[in-house]
Amino acid sequence: MADPEPVDILLSPAGGGDATDTDPTIADAARREIAPAPPAGTPPPPSVPAAYTIIAFVNPSSGGRRGAKVLLVLRELLGPDAVYDIKADGGPGRGLDAVSGAAPPPAPSAAVAAAAAGERSVVRVRAFVAGGDGTFSWVASVVEARGLSHVALAPIPLGSGNDISRALGWGVKYPGSSALPTLVEYFRGREVVRERLLDVWRVSVTGVSSVASSTSVDAGGASHTARPVMVNYISFGVDAAVELAFNEQRWRHPDRYKTRGGNLTAHLTLGAKHVLVGSKMTTAAFLESVTVDGVEVSVPPRTQSLIILNIPSYGGGTQPWGFPNARAARKRGHTPMTVDDGRFEVLALPNLAHYTLLRMRVPAMRLAQGRVAVVRLRSGVRCPAQVDGEPWAQEGGVVTIRAGAEGEEVSVEEGEDGRRGRGQVAAVPGPRWHERRRANAKFSIE
């Protein structure tokens, strides 16, 4: 299918986007994974189920408004009824409603073969999520809350850090509209792409109302200004203060923040100010206690950020947990992280200057791994916090991170369809993940 006619989208104050701010090489990686087409007229094997139902959720405001063009291109590729404007719809609910009822039946030959073999026919749904980390988290939160085990997600990166896209192998930045047809073809592949499980964590805030950044993408849609689900990480401290300051500036001056490069520069500038002036912020000022699986965790007094991590990518591609060796496992019980084991990692970042060391693969201070974290904040003391890049300010209260709602039984056993249920969503690894890069998310079942 030919690409649609180009659409003029304002991507920067200067009047256009920078073509170098894309990564079309992800399409080359996808082509290497796509199986060659069978000769014309070759019937499909009778045991192969019907094609996946493919849909997409797009945040048109992401990527310096580049998402608006992605919306048009994907509607050309997938059809207008399969691509949803998540901002106009107020969330992914309308699209998920469309695929939560009766799924399209498999091809007759496949249905007959499945019945003859006594197998249960399952039709899967795969959904692109085009936006930043916050948009992916938003969609994942609804998929997990509804228990939609037949829906598997994959990111199209349009944000600044794009940590979930990095971890799942879908690239570090927007691949460009010319790459999207190839990614759609890769996405449809049954033999090439095996779906995996990704842990997600419920975030609840009790005790004191929080003060939101006005740029939260799901404003008005969550019971708290804290995002209700964590996919990447949640942090408290100076890194969240930088994100909060950036979002407040972007809200006041949206025309200044229309390119990924400009957004990254703004983040670096705000971070440098904290480093150069020797920020006095420490977590001791606002953290009352931190417990993991009921055991209190000792946070070093000079810590400037407390991070609870779910994926091996933080702050635009660093790996703060690193790769614990056998000695670390014997001494502290710390093991390499996987994203489907029902555990998160808790770390202390001494200061923003350590971010440079993270880039050099020097890990942050490892504190714990666990399944339930309770962070108690001091009343009346302002605490900057962020979940998956969406910041807010909290004054007191209790923040709980766990799989599933409190009191809800969460199973880590696989069901008959290979899915584990609440506390996880299905994800589709991208072409870069299949290259087995060091920075890729690791799964406990390969």
Image (cartoon, rainbow, N blue to C red):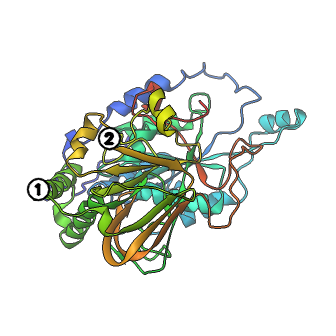
Residue position for label 1: 14
Query: Secondary structure under badge 1?
Result: loop
- In the rendered view, tell whether residue 92 sits above or below residue 32: below
For the question of whether residue 215 can be seen, the reply is: no
For the residue carrying disc 2, how many other residues have a C-alpha within 10 Å: few (<14), some (14-19), or many (20+)?
Answer: many
**Left or right of 193 in this view: 114:** right
Label disc, if present, on residue 414 of the rendered structure: none
Of residues 197 and 241, the one drawn nearer to the viewer in this rendering: 241
Instruction: Name the quadrant containing residue 166.
Output: top left
Q: Nearer the viewer, mark 1 or mark 2?
A: 2
Residue position for label 2: 318
Q: Position of residue 89 (x, y in %)?
A: 48, 69
Q: Position of residue 388 (x, y in %)?
A: 40, 57
- In the rendered view, tell whether residue 303 sits above or below residue 378: above
| Quarter of the image with the N terminus in it | top left
Q: CA–CA distance between discs 1 and 2?
A: 31 Å
The residue at the point 37 percent across, 46 percent down is 163
